Image (cartoon, grey):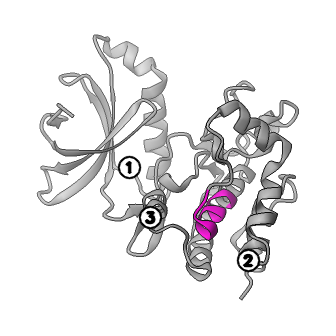
């Protein structure tokens, strides 16, 4: 990326480390604290007035994510500690501490499936974080392997850009946020969408998809077409896949409980999940 410095030179960009949606993510050094590195989430804007930027949904989401994560005090949540607008470089930015580990996506691509014991440990550790945020009426809404970084052998949740307050729903059906591979079936049904759009149950479904990834080294759904993928989720094709691939596996009970089709019956706490661990 051509951008070298932002925020009056405070952040010196070292390298691009990711891109998703509108945002680019870069590793940068915080020059006010030499040797401290941050992950900068950056969105570019061009030839716009400051008033227009403040009204822009991207800026408002940044503001919301910053305020949200500032109040979440948990060692397994990556908290943003700075955000703003750099008019000289035409960017909106947010900074969080740079984590040295790898995402679960990177580890799965490199190593394939995890051992049952290690996969179970990671799943329960993520469940502990979900308990914490749900108790504070926060729903992540985009839980997936690329938003979990393993640092010092523990999973850390990142990217709360789509996070919401539990129970709120101002989104119209058909524009659900999140990554389709990890979207719960009730969000693809017009009759249940509004009730469950920002309900904690969607995070537990996503954890079930991650659990399947970790136990098998595979994704539940492999369809390249979003329409075919959505149809498969809506019709419950994952249930056949789970039964076939995890038959006799120690992780079967956990995955089935997390991928329960009825959100009211779906497992919804670390304690409930622990009771299903097969030793």
- On the image, the x and y values in percent for residue 223 come to 66, 41
Residue under label 3: 107
Residue under label 2: 249
Judging depth in this view, the residue of 236 and 134 nearest the camera is 236
Q: Which mark is on residue 120? A: none
- On the image, the x and y values in percent for residue 8 come to 14, 34
Residue under label 1: 80
Magenta span of residues? 208-218
> Vertical placement of 248 versus 98: above or below?
below
- At x 20% / y 25%, what residue is drawn? 89
Q: Are marks 3 and 1 in contact (CB under 8 Å)?
A: no
* Few, some or many residues within 10 Å of mark 3 (<14, 14–19, 20+): some
Q: Earlier in the sequence, mark 2 or mark 3?
A: 3
Judging depth in this view, the residue of 50 and 48 nearest the camera is 48
Q: Secondary structure at mark 1?
A: loop
Q: CA distance from mark 3 to mark 1?
A: 24 Å
Q: Earlier in the sequence, mark 1 or mark 2?
A: 1
> Vertical placement of 64 versus 77: above or below?
above
Placement of the N terminus among the 4 image quadrants: top left
Placement of the C terminus among the 4 image quadrants: bottom right
Instruction: Examine the structure image and report whether residue 246 is included in the region drawn in magenta.
Output: no
- On the image, the x and y values in percent for residue 131 come to 65, 64
Q: In terms of image quadrants, where is residue 128?
A: bottom right
Q: Is residue 73 visible?
A: no
């Amino acid at each position: 990326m051509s951008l070298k410095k932002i925020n009056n030179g405070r952040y010196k960009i070292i390298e691009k480390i990711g891109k998703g949606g509108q945002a680019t993510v870069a590793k940068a050094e915080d020059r006010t604290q030499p040797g401290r590195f941050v992950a900068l989430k950056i969105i570019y804007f061009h030839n716009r007035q400051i008033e227009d930027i403040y009204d822009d949904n991207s800026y408002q989401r940044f503001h919301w994510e910053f305020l949200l994560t500032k109040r979440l005090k948990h060692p397994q949540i990556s908290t943003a500690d700075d955000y703003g607008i750099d008019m000289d470089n035409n960017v909106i930015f947010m900074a969080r501490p740079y984590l040295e580990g790898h995402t679960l996506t990177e580890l799965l691509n490199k190593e394939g499936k995890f051992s049952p014991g290690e996969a179970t440990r990671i799943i329960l550790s993520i469940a502990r974080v979900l308990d914490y945020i749900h108790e504070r009426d926060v729903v992540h809404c985009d839980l997936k392997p690329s938003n979990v970084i393993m640092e010092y052998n523990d999973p850390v949740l990142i990217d709360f850009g789509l996070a919401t307050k539990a129970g709120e729903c101002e989104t119209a059906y058909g524009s659900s946020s999140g990554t389709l591979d990890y979207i719960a079936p009730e969000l693809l049904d017009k009759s249940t969408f509004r009730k469950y759009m920002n309900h904690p149950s969607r995070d537990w479904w996503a954890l079930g998809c991650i659990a399947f990834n970790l136990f098998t080294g595979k994704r539940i759904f492999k369809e390249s077409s979003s329409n075919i993928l959505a149809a498969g989720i809506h019709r419950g094709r994952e249930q056949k896949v789970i039964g076939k691939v995890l038959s006799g596996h120690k992780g079967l009970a956990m995955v089935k409980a997390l991928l329960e089709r009825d959100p009211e019956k779906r497992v919804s706490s670390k304690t409930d999940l622990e009771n299903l661990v097969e030793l």
